[in-house]
Image (cartoon, rainbow, N blue to C red):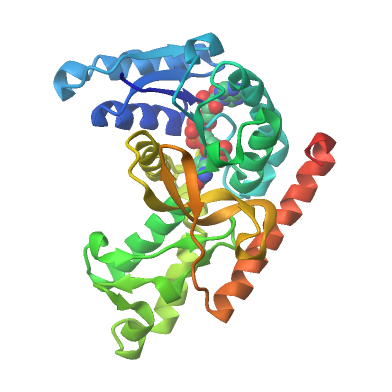
């Protein structure tokens, strides 16, 4: 039985998600947007590429949640992106309102869906989505860590002239300036990055610059684009999560997941390595963090908690 993925938000990321999912033949696609024309136009355009690209997925555009009924996966990008000079947190007020509308739309139409949230500020918006929708915590997850880790790995591969496939790393914590590159578990051709610093293959200063460039990865692209933010890498990251669920691949992926005591954190979503399989978030992986990583991770958690407090002031139903 062919799976069904509904994309709530047919903007830059939503349209790219639809195209990538179609090219992979992953599922039938419903592109949903309040701007119905955008959803319908992009769906028709992608569908018209099917003879060229050789896929036969059904893809429609709509502004009716009825059409998204019984989705296996829902990927949410509904919201407004940053403009130059804005932080992800500046989007909180407007995107909280939007995510509440989305939660109302999907609650009764796709109660068994695996929901991947992409809308910023990610860590709090995914938390609000889970509360507003009432979906099980293991079926609501945020996409950020895969993108941040992918940016970090790309920058390292460019610096070290090593294929990206040969670099393993995780960027965890909140999806903001306090995100944490886990250097202790970063390897290049199987060798820990700290060894490469000792061998003089990469300067510590250069490594720190790469960590900072990763933290500012989104803002760097917003500056270039002026209107809108990154969408190719975010979409590719969201598709990896959807595929791991649909194909029960049980991949270990850095995602914003609900913590119930792991990493000394309870009752909060934050970026951690999880296993994604047919039951959704099947396990939170407890990594051995260095003392410095523990301090930085807890700092990142505090910034998520601070933003959650700001969200609760906007909508006390989040208390
Ligand atoms: O790593 C990450 N999680 C981030 C997330 C990476 C990049 C971008 N990040 C955020 O994703 C960004 O800050 C935004 O909050 C979302 C979506 O970014 P995108 O670039 O796709 O924004 P667009 O192109 O403006 O698309 C948003 C669409 C647009 O077509 C609106 O009409 C639609 O959302 N929209 C709605 N759809 C459904 N329901 C409602 N209420 C709604 N309001 C707006």
x, y percent for residue 260: 65, 54
Picture quadrant where residue 187 is located: bottom left
Residue at position x 51%, y 59% in the image? 216
Question: Which quadrant is the C terminus positioned in?
Answer: top right
Residue 144 visible in the snapshot: no
Picture quadrant where residue 125 is located: top right
x, y percent for residue 131: 70, 35
The correct choice, above or below, for 165 with respect to 59 in the image is below
- In this rendering, position of residue 62 left or right of residue 299: left
- In this rendering, position of residue 112 left or right of residue 50: right
Within the displayed image, which quadrant is ligand 1 positioned in? top right
Residue 223 visible in the snapshot: yes
Number of labels in the image equals 0
Picture quadrant where residue 121 is located: top right
x, y percent for residue 83: 58, 42
Residue at position x 48%, y 59% in the image? 285
- In this rendering, position of residue 256 left or right of residue 3: right
The correct choice, above or below, for 61 with respect to 131 in the image is above
The correct choice, above or below, for 33 with respect to 316 in the image is above
x, y percent for residue 308: 74, 48
């Amino acid at each position: 039985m062919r799976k069904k993925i509904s994309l709530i938000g047919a903007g830059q990321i939503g349209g790219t998600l639809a195209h990538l999912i179609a090219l992979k033949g992953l599922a039938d696609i419903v592109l949903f947007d309040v701007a119905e024309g955008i959803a319908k136009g992009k769906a028709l355009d992608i569908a018209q590429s099917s003879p060229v690209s050789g896929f036969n997925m059904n893809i429609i555009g709509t502004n009716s949640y009825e059409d998204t009924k019984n989705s296996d996966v829902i990927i949410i990008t509904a919201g407004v992106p940053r403009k130059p000079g804005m932080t992800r947190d500046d989007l909180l007020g407007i995107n909280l309102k939007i995510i509440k509308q989305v939660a109302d739309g999907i609650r009764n139409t796709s109660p068994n869906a695996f929901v991947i949230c992409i809308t910023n500020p990610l860590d709090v918006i995914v938390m609000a989505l889970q509360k507003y929708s009432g979906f099980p915590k293991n079926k609501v997850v945020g996409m950020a860590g895969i993108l941040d880790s992918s940016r970090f790995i790309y920058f390292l591969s460019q610096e070290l002239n090593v294929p990206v496939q040969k670099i393993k790393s995780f960027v965890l914590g909140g999806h903001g300036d306090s995100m944490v590159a886990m250097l202790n578990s970063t390897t290049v051709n199987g060798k820990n990055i700290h060894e490469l610093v000792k061998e003089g293959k990469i300067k510590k200063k250069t490594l720190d610059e790469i960590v900072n460039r990763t933290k500012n990865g989104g803002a760097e692209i917003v500056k270039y684009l002026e209107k809108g933010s990154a969408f190719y890498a975010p979409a590719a990251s969201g598709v990896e999560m959807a595929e791991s669920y649909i194909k029960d691949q049980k991949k270990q992926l850095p995602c914003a997941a609900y913590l119930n005591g792991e990493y000394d954190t309870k009752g909060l979503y934050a970026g951690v390595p999880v296993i994604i399989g047919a039951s959704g978030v099947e396990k939170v992986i407890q990594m051995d963090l260095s003392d410095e990583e523990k301090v930085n991770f807890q700092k990142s958690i505090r910034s998520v908690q601070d933003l959650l407090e700001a969200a609760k002031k906007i909508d006390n139903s989040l208390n």
